[in-house]
Structure formats: structure tokens, C-alpha cells
Image (cartoon, rainbow, N blue to C red):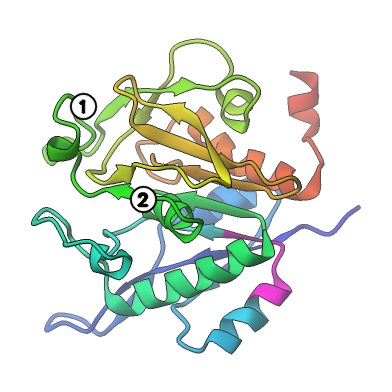
Amino acid sequence: MAAKPLIGITTDYRSARKEHAALSFVAAGYYDGILASGGIPVIIPPLAEEDDIVRVLDTLDGVVMVGGGDLDPRRDGYMPHPAVRMMEPRREDFDRLLAKHVCARHMPVLGVGCGMQLLNITEGGTLFLHLPEDLPRAIPHKDPTDLAHRHALLVEPGTAMERVYGDGEIRVNSMHHMAIDDVANSFRVTARAPDGVVEAIESTVEGWTAIGVQFHPEADTASALDVKIFEEFIIGITGVVPEMRLVA
């Protein structure tokens, strides 16, 4: 039996506050999704030294870049919108260094939420900073009063998204106000919301398993199909399709 792939999972970070010490944390849905799909999750804290990041990546078979707060637009030459709620600088410093090396190596990667956005930026793409203003006709992509807010998903044929969802009506959770604008040349759009907003991307580079989703397959509001995105990611690394999927 082939060894299970080691999958690094990044963490969110919160600096010390009056009520608690500094924290690194990650939603259990990320490592549960990897475990259920045949991988071994390895939690990665926000490392500061680039050489340490390189050494860690040398030991891994793939990386999951988790969702969280907003990327700082100033780091990409843009003024921040008042609606932007930036992630902690320590986390963003690490995430950007990690993404640089992951993309340079064409290492298998799954980006979720801002993780997908960062992959696109790292490869030369751009972002909308606030959908209600950048695309006034867009459907709601975030509802602060409803954490289970969902919208339809339109998938492209012949993609990982189609293999996950198949035919029929698809709805995914949605909790974002930033989104991909210009798609980097090394990616293609594989799913959109009905208003055209990019909801999933996949690599166009031969041999590079790279998937990004704007929605959250790790969340409590995810469906059983959403969670299969982790399985599709592991299949892209190992090339082994689970027996249950072969039978189906």
C-alpha cells in the first residue's frame, strides 16, 4: 500500500489580547477533510524564516491554504477599501512567502477563500476589493445575519468541480466580499456564481494540481458534496481514485 500523502495546512493567527495570549488556530473541517480523503494533515504555524518554510515544504506532498481575513491591498499596490478587514500581518507575511514557494515549485495546493485569492495574486492576477461596489449588480455573497448563506454554483465541464458535483442544482456557502477580478494566466475559471463572480479556479499548468475555491468546504455549513473537494485534491496528488468512487 502506498504511503499516505503528507498535507500541510496553514493556520489563522490572532495576536495577544487582553482576554487571551497569541493564538494559532485552524478549523477542524480542514484536517478532518484531509483525513477522510486519505491524507495525513500537518499543521503549519506562521513561520517567519524563509529557509524554514522551504525546509517544511521539502517534507510535504501538498498544501492547503486556509481561509480567513482579508489580504492587505496595499501590498499589491492598491488603496484599501473601508470594508476590508485585514488579517494579522504575521499571518499574511507567512502566507505570501509560502504561496511564492508553492507556486514556484508547482506544488499541489488547495486554496480556500483568501487562500484562493492569494494563489491568484501570486501568479499575477487581481482582486475586487468590495463586490457591492465593484459589481453593484452582483448577488449577495455575504450575509452577516446568516452564517449559512448560500448561492448557486455553475461549474465548467471537464474540471475537478464537475467531478465533485456532477449534474443538478448546486448551492454552496458564501461569506466573502472580495473576489477574483483578473484571473492569472496559470489558472482558469472552473465555477462561477450566477452573477459571474469567480468561485473556483484550477491550474492550466501541466502536471500542477492546484485548486482554489471561494466557498468553504471545511465549514459546518458545507454539504457532503463540498467536502469531496478534499478528496479530489488528494486524488490529484496520488492519482488513486477511491474504490467507492470507481463503483459509483
Instruction: Give the residue number, with chain letter if any, for mark 2.
Output: 126
Query: Does residue 17 lie above or below 227 as drawn?
Result: below
Query: Does residue 9 lie above or below 136 as drawn?
Result: below
Residue drawn at x 22%, y 44% as measured from the top left: 177
Distance from label 1 to label 2 (Cα)?
Answer: 18 Å
In the image: residue 218, left or right of residue 187: left
Front residue of 215 and 221? 215
The answer to the question of whether label 1 and label 2 lie on touching residues, with beta carbons closer than 8 A, is: no
Q: What residue type is labelled 1?
A: Ala
Q: What residue type is labelled 2?
A: Thr
Instruction: Give the residue number, with chain letter if any, for mark 1.
Output: 138
For label 1, count other residues whose C-alpha is less than 10 Å away and answer few (under 14), some (14-19) or many (20+): some
Secondary element under disc 2, as helix, strand or loop, is loop
For label 2, count other residues whose C-alpha is less than 10 Å away and answer few (under 14), some (14-19) or many (20+): some
Q: Which quarter of the rendered picture does the C terminus lie within?
A: top right
Give, as a single range, the part of the protein colored magenta: 57-63
Give residue 102's mark.
Answer: none
Residue 87 lies in quadrant: bottom left
Q: Is residue 58 magenta?
A: yes
In the image: residue 190, left or right of residue 140: right
Would residue 143 be visible to someone looking at this image? no
Q: Where is residue 193 in the image (x, y as percent from the top left)?
A: 35, 25
Residue drawn at x 11%, y 53% as measured from the top left: 83
Query: Does residue 41 lie above or below 138 as drawn?
Result: below
**Which numbered mark, 1 or 2, is in the foreground of this view?**
2
Q: Position of residue 235 (x, y in %)?
A: 73, 42
Q: Where is residue 129 in the image (x, y as percent from the top left)?
A: 22, 49
